[in-house]
Amino acid sequence: MTQTAARTAGATREQVLAAAGRSKVAAVQLALLPRSAKDALLNAMAAALRDSVAVILAANALDVAAAIAVDTSASLVDRLRLNDSRIEAMARGLEDLVALPDPIGSVVRGGVLANGVQISQIRVPLGVVAIIYEARPNVTVDATGIALKSGNAVLLRGSASAQGSNAVLVRILSAAVDGQGVSADAVQLVPGTDRESVKHLMTARGLVDVIIPRGGAGLIKAVVDGSTVPVIETGVGNCHVFVDASADLDMALDILINSKVRRPSVCNAAETLLVHADVAGLFIPRALAALAAEGVTVHADPVILEMADGAGHVVAAVDADFDTEYLSLDIAAAVVDDLDAAIAHINRHGTGHTEAIVTSDLAGAGAFTARVDAAAVMVNASTAFTDGGEFGFGAEIGISTQKLHARGPMGLVELTSTKYVLTGTGQIRAAS
């Protein structure tokens, strides 16, 4: 079977449900594939990407030009843009998944009951996984690879701004899948580019097993509030770096700059700097100078604003700045009285993504990791490490910031559920 649904701006509910139905059929085939067959899919898709670089870049150039023409922000254009190295990274990400264990069929726990019945809890695919995401065409490839390796069919709903790039990528990926004897419907774009098609997808309960939104707070809230299909929340990252009184200040400066400027447009970038009052006089001037050298605008509390002495890259912070995911060369900054104040600030303003402390105090580090409510907590390390690849999971499908089912980088295991298999020798349960 091939992907046949029209990808028009105003796709009907019937078209969206038909695509989901085809995914449901493909998911049955995928669930039964051995690891060798799934790894062959990944290798074939990686090879197809490398063979199609010129075609991908041509489609992406049109998307980028259209985005620039309507004054799209630089951070969103960066997320949208592909180049040779980013396409190669997508291909390598698929190959990295080949080297990872197949979670399907692995035993989570098991044993023998008192009556002699053997019980095993084993990992199984979720089924049909739908991804709703903004701008980034690399998500198309990453999500496809993780979904297929974990035995799931994938429905992809990218933003209209990346429609040309996504359409080409899905065509390449689905053709590679089809070439391996697996239904091309295992990888589909959701028909339509308007909001109605998203609503149809979110209410396809019974055909779609889970929806994972990737994007800004508005997108995630809309999906969580409007979906009748189970949702895994991902990604809004108001991440903090807290420089404690005992911190090695050279280390703290390196971690701050890497966390903020390595790639400002991603969800693990630092958006707030907190500094213990005892080292503020030493650290803040160095931090302001280093951030200015990188082109970062600091939204500063009154203490830091006074230290800046009118520097052009420092502006007065308003309350909303400490709740903002900038995704740009901006950072909020404040001085706090102590560790308790830092933790209170983070738990009040953070989004449960990634929080970092720089400290030489083991007790303080322990208190920070125990009391900060986040999917990932860094001690003397950059927030940039919250990433599936860095964690050894391969390419990730997103960073879950919720607490049910999955939390943190979502790799292969996080796209599985479990079932119990009981094997007996004729045992029956006594009447109650």
Image: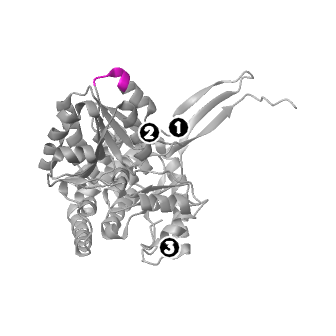
Pick the front one: 385 or 197: 385
Which residue, given by chain and number where applicable, does mark 3 sit on?
Answer: 196
Where's residue 121, x and y in %? 60, 34
Kind of residue sitting beneath label 1: Gly
Q: Residue at x 40, y 50 (%)?
A: 235
Q: CA distance from mark 3 to mark 1?
A: 37 Å
Kind of residue sitting beneath label 3: Glu
Secondary structure of the residue carrying tag 1 is loop
Q: Residue at x 30, y 45 (%)?
A: 272
- Are circles 3 and 2 on residues that touch, CB within 8 Å? no
Q: Residue furthest right?
A: 431
In reply to whether residue 426 is colored magenta, the answer given is no
Which residue, given by chain and number where applicable, does mark 2 sit on?
Answer: 102
Above or below, 399 relative to 199: above
Q: CA distance from mark 2 to mark 1?
A: 8 Å
Q: Is residue 351 visible?
A: no
Task: Give the prevailing secondary structure in the magenta stretch.
Answer: helix
Above or below, 431 relative to 307: above
Q: Quadrant of residue 345?
A: top left
Number of the front mark, 3 or 1: 3
Where's residue 65, x and y in %? 22, 72
Kind of residue sitting beneath label 2: Asp
Which residue, given by chain and number where applicable, does mark 1 sit on?
Answer: 105
Where's residue 424, x and y in %? 71, 29
Q: Which residues are magenta?
A: 360-364
- Are circles 2 and 1 on residues that touch, CB within 8 Å? yes
Within 10 Å of disc 2 (Cα), the crowding (few <14, some 14-19, many 20+) is many
Secondary structure of the residue carrying tag 2 is loop
Pick the front one: 135 or 320: 320
In reply to whether residue 363 is colored magenta, the answer given is yes
